[in-house]
Structures are given as C-alpha cells and as structure tokens.
C-alpha cells in the first residue's frame, strides 16, 4: 500500500509502532502501453504497465496467444528499466495507445474463454 503522507499511513495503521518512511521517488502517473516483436515473428506482443503495479503482457507461444500478469514496482526508474530491457531484447518496439492494447486484450481474452468453456463443457 502506498501512502501519501504520515497522516494517511497512521490512520491505516493505528496500532503500528513502526517507522514511517517518506516515499519521495517519482512514480509513473499513467499506464504505459507498448508493442514489441522479434524480427522473425509475424505477430506483435503487447504490454501494459499499470499505475497500480501490474505488468500485463499479451504474447504468442507458437500459435497460442496468452495473457500474463506480474507485479512490478511503479517507480519511474524501474518502469523505464523494464522498457529498456524490452527494447534491448526485441528488434521492433513502439509505444501505442490504450485502444490498440485493449483491442488485442479483448481478442485474446475471448479466445481463451471460448477454449475453456468448450473444454469444460460450460
């Protein structure tokens, strides 16, 4: 949990005798959306880093498209480090808009739901 100041921390932790530490490192203010691709891949992989600390990736494994979610610190330097890592490991990288990411997310999500429902006789 991130607290803006001592008062909000103390209100959330009235019995805590611990030490409050001011967190003054800059954090990302809006979600970041991007796509990246290996030179030989036909499809792009997509990513979103949220302000709440989630790294959402849409990627392909062979013909299977999937969605992964991991936690990530939202400090600006750590997010930029992750973006730099992706840029270094993939030939094509670009920042994209929210709608392009959500279109890809919806497409993969529907395919996964269809598969699960079919196999589970749901």
Image: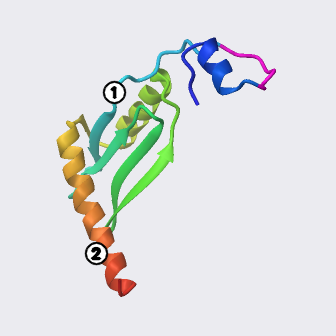
> Looking at the figure, which quarter contains the C terminus?
bottom left
Q: Pinpoint residue 20: horizontal percent, then vertical percent.
A: 71, 16
Residue drawn where x is 24% and y is 45% of the image: 101
Q: Does residue 5 appear in this view?
A: yes
Q: Is residue 63 visible?
A: no
Q: Indicate the quadrant where residue 66 lies.
A: bottom left
Query: Is label 2 in a helix, a strand or a loop?
Result: helix
Q: Which residues are magenta?
A: 15-21
Place of residue 111 in the rendered image (x, y in percent of width and height, measured from the top left) = 26, 69
Residue visible at 55% across and 12% down in the picture: 24
Question: In front: 97, or 85?
Answer: 97
Answer with the quarter of the image where residue 112 lies: bottom left
View extreme (bottom): residue: 121
Residue 2 falls inside the magenta stretch? no
Q: Magenta part mainly helix, strand or loop?
A: loop
Q: Which residue is mark 1?
A: 30
32 or 86: nearer the eye?
32
Residue 83 screen position, x and y as percent: 39, 33
| Residue 63 picture location, percent across and down | 29, 70
Residue drawn at the location 52% of the way across and 32% of the way down: 73
The crowd level at tag 1 (other Cα within 10 Å; few <14, some 14-19, many 20+) is: few
Q: Which mark is residue 86?
A: none
Quadrant for the N terminus in the image: top right
Q: Secondary structure at mark 1?
A: loop
Question: Which residue has dot 2 on it?
Answer: 114
* Mark 2, other Cα within 10 Å: few <14 / some 14–19 / many ≥20: few
**In the picture, residue 95 is in which quadrant?**
top left
């Amino acid at each position: 949990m991130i607290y803006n100041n001592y008062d909000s921390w103390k209100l959330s932790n009235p019995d805590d005798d611990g030490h409050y530490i001011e967190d003054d490192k800059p954090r990302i203010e809006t979600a970041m959306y991007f796509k990246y691709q290996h030179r030989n891949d036909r499809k792009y992989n997509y990513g979103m880093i949220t302000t709440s600390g989630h790294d959402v990736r849409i990627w392909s494994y062979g013909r299977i498209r999937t969605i992964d979610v991991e936690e990530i610190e939202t400090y600006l330097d750590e997010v930029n480090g992750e973006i730099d890592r992706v840029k270094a490991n993939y030939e094509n990288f670009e920042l994209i808009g929210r709608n392009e990411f959500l279109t890809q997310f919806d497409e993969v999500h529907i395919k996964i739901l269809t598969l699960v429902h079919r196999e589970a006789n749901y």
